[in-house]
Image (tube, rainbow, N blue to C red):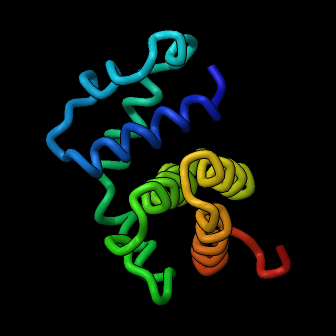
Amino acid sequence: MTQRKARRVILQLLFQYDIHPDSVFEDSLELFPPEFLKGIDFSFVKGCVYGLLEKTDLVDEIINRHAVGWRVDRMGVVDRNIIRFSVYEVIIERRVPVSISVNEAVELAKLFGDEKSSSFVNGVLSKIFKEEGMVSSEQ
């Protein structure tokens, strides 16, 4: 399993849940082509999705504190879920280095967002992680 492929699935599940909060994880997985899901660690994906859903209020509070001029509820659905997941995996779970998470987030924004998403996601995440002391100001 690649982490990038897992992140693609996680983002799409978060998007589905954001649009349809009553959706069920297992039912949402049925929307993917079976060949796409080969090699994916579903316990990892499920843990990330449910972990973020449990901590969404905390994650949104962090984002809102740093995203001056933006509120999470006014961000595009794709952008907000990419940003949420990156903040979750770096600040809450502390399992991924900032540089890797930001790079993956930008790549997801290029793939699923609009033409401005990658720069928006990069800017918001860079500001959050710098102000949270996750990266030095020289980086």
> Which one is in front, 45 or 34?
34
Q: In which quarter of the image is residue 26?
A: top left
Q: Farthest residue toward the left?
A: 22
* Residue 65 in the figure: left or right of residue 39: left
Q: Is residue 101 above or below residue 130?
A: above
> Which one is in front, 57 or 117?
117
What residue is at 77 percent from the left and 76 percent from the top? 136
What residue is at 32 percent from the left and 71 percent from the top? 73
Percent of width and height locating residue 83? 51, 60
Q: Farthest residue toward the front?
A: 115
Q: In this view, does 6 lie above or below 92?
A: above
Percent of width and height locating residue 36? 53, 17
Q: In which quarter of the image is residue 72?
A: bottom left
Percent of width and height locating residue 30? 32, 19
> Which one is in front, 102 or 37?
37
What residue is at 57 percent from the left and 55 percent from the top? 90
What residue is at 67 percent from the left and 57 percent from the top? 102
